[in-house]
């Protein structure tokens, strides 16, 4: 990490997370003598190595002082702001961070010189007269230090702290805590998941991939779930990903080449047993008697929707729907060529299958392409519901939500296709969903690749942008929106409630994430470590 200064004003450095002082103010500051603590200090359960920490905790007038670095503040639920006019503002906030050790190879001296800054300071909106404080804020190595007095630590910040002659000083905040999980090296470079109290990850040893699971509160107690040999004929294909289908955990990986190879789809039961359910290029939905299967093998062909009985081979099954339709593809014509995009919109509600379909053979023009159909899997009755070209759809709260190709806008209708309403003001939503009755969607220069802007559909006015930060992806769980933010901002992840109001900002930058219920698992963009936070 590198220090990021802003000319001559006091600035918050995102890269290193420091309060940096303007050199002209040093002349007016009073110098004091402080020392490193001679006891152990833990912050939210993280042991602080003061001897080799660039910003160690300090002792002044027998009071422990806490360094107000970017990550240390957010670790304990504080947010800080500076302006030349108003000085330093410190306040409790819905923020969190994993522990940053700020480790150096240089051993700290036992006694140090600090200064008493003279700029304006407020704590939770209340002015602090630093010159009159018995235990004033200090500055050391251009970082502001805060006294852990009862007035500030307990009354203003809500921290709990206790002293033990053997264990030293322990400080804990009441907000969400981020844990870096003790997983094998490389675990964050493949698929990871958190599901019903367990963490799942992949370990590659030689030419074997093994899925492990471990209790979320005891990651070292891991057990193997499923192993398979890597197909090296087209280069080692190590990547495996997890997803949740019908409140069950699934995994997918690829074997072989793009055309002659296939995807492998497996399910993990709650007792930690795994089995492969399907192989091929498929979209599938489980039904009581087996499966509804959409065959998305290349080259695309008609009559590719079928029902398959439980235990039946993926190559077999009973045809479903009209045989002169091609199902589950989004089809385009561009410069005289036909393009096919495998979709995943197919949805089963009771006896009805809702699916995207086009005429087969595919016509040379766009007429009748990409319509939403309803197929009754008992009677085989096939009905056209939405007579417009649609690139994707979802069913939420007994309504259809879909994006039209003609104008790129988001619409909704009743399940029978009636009562259509336009929802979005912005074109080409790449992602959309319904949370707490509100419709959210993302818009970017590329609908399938970030960064995006997140909007909420407002039927009575202009759609508001929900957060200013550009986002890379949005996931929903437990009535929340979890937004992984694009690089370059102050925070890495922001969690919103169903109304779009902020609930938590996570300082750590993330390269990927998995959300289930109130658990968020993410991979650090900095070092690929796997981190876990409870969102309750």
Image (tube, rainbow, N blue to C red):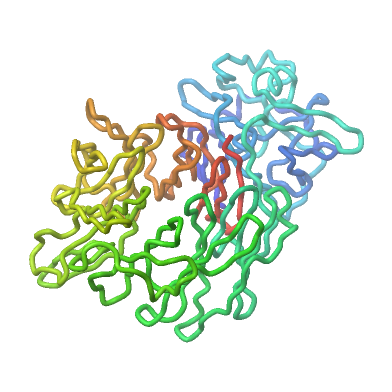
Residue 309, by quadrant, is bottom left
**Residue nearest the observer in this picture, 479 or 522:** 479
| Horizontal arrangement in the rendering, residue 129 relative to residue 436 (left or right) | right
Residue 460 screen position, x and y as percent: 23, 25
Q: Where does the image place residue 79, in percent across and percent down from the top left?
A: 55, 30
Residue 399 left/right relative to 279: left
**Residue located at (28% from left, 43% from top):** 400
The residue lying furthest to the right in this view is 165
Residue sitting nearer the eye, 279 or 175: 279
Residue nearer the viewer, 298 or 102: 298
From this view, report whether residue 247 is shown above or below residue 311.
Answer: above
Q: Quadrant of residue 165?
A: top right
* Above/below status of 377 relative to 434: below
The foreground one among 68 and 506 is 506
Q: In what quadrant of the picture does the C terminus appear? A: top right
Count of residue discs? 0
Residue reaching furthest to the front:
379
Identify whether 46 is placed above or below 200: above
Residue at the location (27% across, 47% down)?
429
Residue 195: image location, x then y, percent: 59, 51
Q: Position of residue 354 (x, y in %)?
A: 29, 52
């Amino acid at each position: 990490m590198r220090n990021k200064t802003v000319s001559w004003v006091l600035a918050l450095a995102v890269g290193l997370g420091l309060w940096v002082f303007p050199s002209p103010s040093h002349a007016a500051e009073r110098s004091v003598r402080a020392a490193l603590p001679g006891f152990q200090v833990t912050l939210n359960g993280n042991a602080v190595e003061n001897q080799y920490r660039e910003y160690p905790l300090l002792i002044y007038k027998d009071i422990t002082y806490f360094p107000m670095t970017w990550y240390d503040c957010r670790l304990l639920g504080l947010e800080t702001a500076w302006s030349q006019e108003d000085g330093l503002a410190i306040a409790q906030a819905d923020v969190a961070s994993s522990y940053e050790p700020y480790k150096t190879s240089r051993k700290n001296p036992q006694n140090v010189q600090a200064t008493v800054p003279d700029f304006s300071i407020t704590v939770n909106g209340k002015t602090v007269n630093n010159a009159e404080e018995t235990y004033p804020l200090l500055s050391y190595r251009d970082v502001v230090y805060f006294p852990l007095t009862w007035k500030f630590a307990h009354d203003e910040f809500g921290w709990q702290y206790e002293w033990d002659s053997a264990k030293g000083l322990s400080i804990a905040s009441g907000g969400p805590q981020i844990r870096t999980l003790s997983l094998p090296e490389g675990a964050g470079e493949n698929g990871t998941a958190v599901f019903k109290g367990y963490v799942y990850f992949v370990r590659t040893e030689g030419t074997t991939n093994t899925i492990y699971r471990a209790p979320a509160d005891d990651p070292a107690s891991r057990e193997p779930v499923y192993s398979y040999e890597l197909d090296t004929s087209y280069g080692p294909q190590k990547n495996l990903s997890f997803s949740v289908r019908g409140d069950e955990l699934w995994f997918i990986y690829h074997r072989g080449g793009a055309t002659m190879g296939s995807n492998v789809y497996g399910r993990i039961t709650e007792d930690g047993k795994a089995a492969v359910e399907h192989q091929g290029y498929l979209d599938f939905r489980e039904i009581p008697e087996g499966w509804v299967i959409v065959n998305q093998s290349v080259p695309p062909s008609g009559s590719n929707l079928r029902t398959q009985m439980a235990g039946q081979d993926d190559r077999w099954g009973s045809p479903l729907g009209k045989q002169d339709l091609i199902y589950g593809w989004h089809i385009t014509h561009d410069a005289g060529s036909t393009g096919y995009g495998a979709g995943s919109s197919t949805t089963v509600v009771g006896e009805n299958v809702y699916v995207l379909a086009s005429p087969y053979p595919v016509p040379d023009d766009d007429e009748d392409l990409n319509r939403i159909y309803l197929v009754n899997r008992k009677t085989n009755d096939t009905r056209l519901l939405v007579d417009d070209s649609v690139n994707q759809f979802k069913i939420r709260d007994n309504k259809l939500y879909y994006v039209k190709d003609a104008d790129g806008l988001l619409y909704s209708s009743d399940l029978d296709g009636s009562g259509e309403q336009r929802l979005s003001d912005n074109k080409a939503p790449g992602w959309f969903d319904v949370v707490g009755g509100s419709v959210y969607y993302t818009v970017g220069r590329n609908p399938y690749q970030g960064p995006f802007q997140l909007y909420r559909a407002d039927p009575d006015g202009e759609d508001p942008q929900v957060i200013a930060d550009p986002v890379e992806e949005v996931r929903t769980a437990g009535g929340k929106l979890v937004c992984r933010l694009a690089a370059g901002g102050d925070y890495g992840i922001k969690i919103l409630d169903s109304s779009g109001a902020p609930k938590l900002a996570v300082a750590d930058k993330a390269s990927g994430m998995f959300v289930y219920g109130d658990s968020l698992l993410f991979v650090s963009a900095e070092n690929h470590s796997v981190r876990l936070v409870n969102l309750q």
